[in-house]
Image (tube, helix red, strand yellow):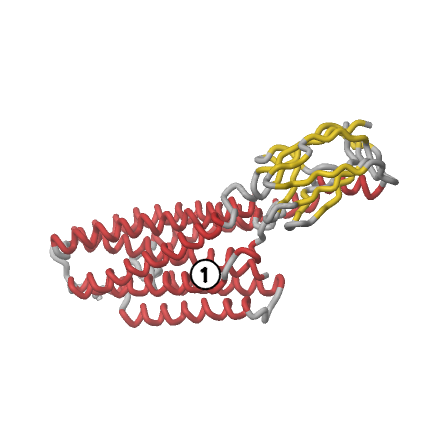
Amino acid sequence: MAEALTPHQAHEEAANERATFGFWVYLMTDLLMFSILFAAYSVLHGNTLGGASPRQLFSQPVALTETLILLTSSFTNGIGMYRAREGKKNQMLVWFGITFLLGLSFLGLEIREFTKFFHEGHTLTSSGFLSSFFVLVGTHGLHITSGLLWMGTTLGFVMARGLTPGLVRKLSLLSLFWHFLDIVWIFIFTIVYLQALV
Amino acid sequence: MKREHGTIRNYVIGFVLSLVFTLIPYFLAVNHLLIGLVLFITILAFALVQAGIQLLFFLHLGRERNPRWQSGFLMVTAGGLFVVTVGTSWILYHLHTNMAPTAEALQLAQDEGIAQIGDKKTGACDETYTVHTVTIKQNIANPSHIDARLCDEIVFTNDDNTSRDIAFGAPNKPVPYGGVNDLPLAKGQSQMLILNQTGTQSFHDHLNDEATGDFAVTP
C-alpha cells in the first residue's frame, strides 16, 4: 500500500493527520455536549404543563423527509470529497453543490417547522418538553447553518484558487463535520420524532 | 487513492444500508407494528447500528494508521456519553418516581380528606356553599376579583372564540391550586373550581397570558 513519499508529500501527510485528529477531538467534545442535550430531552419530554405533547406536535413524514435529505447530502458530500482527492475540480464542485442545496433545504424545512410551532403558541417557554426540544434541535440546526457557511466559503475559495492541498484538507475536515451532523440527526430522528409514537 | 479514504463503492454501500436502517424503524413506529418499550428499544438499536454504519462507511473509522488515536478517542467519548445519557435517565427516573410533587400531595390530601398540609389549608369540602362566576369575554375576566369563603366554588366560563387554559400564580411561574394544575376551557365551555385552599390566589389564561384576575379565600 505505502508508496515512497517525497519529503514534501510526507510533510503534507503529517499536516493532514494532525489537522484531522485535532478536528476529531473537537467533534468528540461536541458529541458530549449533544449527549447532555439528549439527556435533558429524555428527562423532560413528558413535562408538557398541560400543553401539546410530542405525539400531538410532531409530523413524522416531515421528519423522515428531513432525515432522507440530510442522509443524501452526507452521501453526496462523500462522493464530492472522493472527487476532490482525485483532483477533479468540476465534478467535486457539482457534488458539493448538491450537498449545499440539500443542506439548505433541510434547514428550510426545520425553520418552517419551528415557525409553525411558534405561530401555534408552542414556544421555548411553554413547557420543559418544548424548552429541551428547541434547544436540542435548534443546536443541531445552528451546526448545520455554520456548516453551510463553511461549505459556501470553502467552495468559493476552490472556484477562485483551484484544489490546493490546503483547501482539500479544509474540505476533508468539513466532510467529517457534515457526516458527524448526520449521525447526530439519526438520534434526533429516533429519540425526538420516532419516540413520540412510543 | 489511499486505503484510509474509502472508495465510491464504500459510500454507496453505506448510503443504501443507512436508508434501510432509517426506513425500517420509521415504518415500525408509524404503523404501530411494535409499541411501548419494545418499540423504543428497537428504534434505538436501529439508530445505534446506523451510527456504526456511517462511522465505518462515511467516516472510515478503523482505517486510519496505527496508533489509532481517532478510534481510541471515540471509545473514551462513548464511555462519557453512556454515563451522561443512561446515568441521567436512571437517576432522574428514580427521583421522579420517589418524590411526590406538591400538586399530587395536595390532590392526595383532598382525596383523603386531610384538612391541612404544612401551613396550607386544604382537604375535601363535603359540600360547597356560594357559587361565584367568572366570565371571560374579549380577553378580560369579569369580575377580576372575588372574595370567597373556604369551600365556595367558582365557575369559569369562556365566552371567547379561542381555547383557554386557566392556570394559577404568575404567568411565567404557574402553581397548582388545591391540587388542580389548570382548567382547560374550550370556547363556550365552563369549568368549576372548588375553593379548598385559603389565601389570595391569582389566575390567568395560560395559553394567551391574558384574562388575569384573583380570588381571596377566607376560612
State which quadrant residue A176 falls in.
Answer: bottom left
Q: Which residue is mark 1?
A: A63
Toward the viewer: B78 or B26?
B26
Subunit of label 1: A
Residue B80 at least partly seen: no
Image quadrant holding the C terminus of chain B, namely top right
- Classify 10 Å Cα crowding around label 1: few (below 14), some (14-19), many (20 and above): many
Answer with left or right where residue B22 lies relative to residue A89: right
| Residue A145 located left or right of residue A161 | right
**Residue B14 found in image quarter:** bottom left
The residue shown at (47%, 59%) is A189
* Looking at the image, residue A38 lies above or below residue B147: below
Q: Residue furthest right?
A: B126
Measuring from the top left, give residue A130's x and y in whole percent. Answer: 53, 47
Mark 1 belongs to which amino acid?
A: Ala
Residue at (34% x, 65% y) in the render = A72
- Report the side of A81 relative to B58 (left or right): left
Residue drawn at x 74%, y 40% as measured from the top left: B179
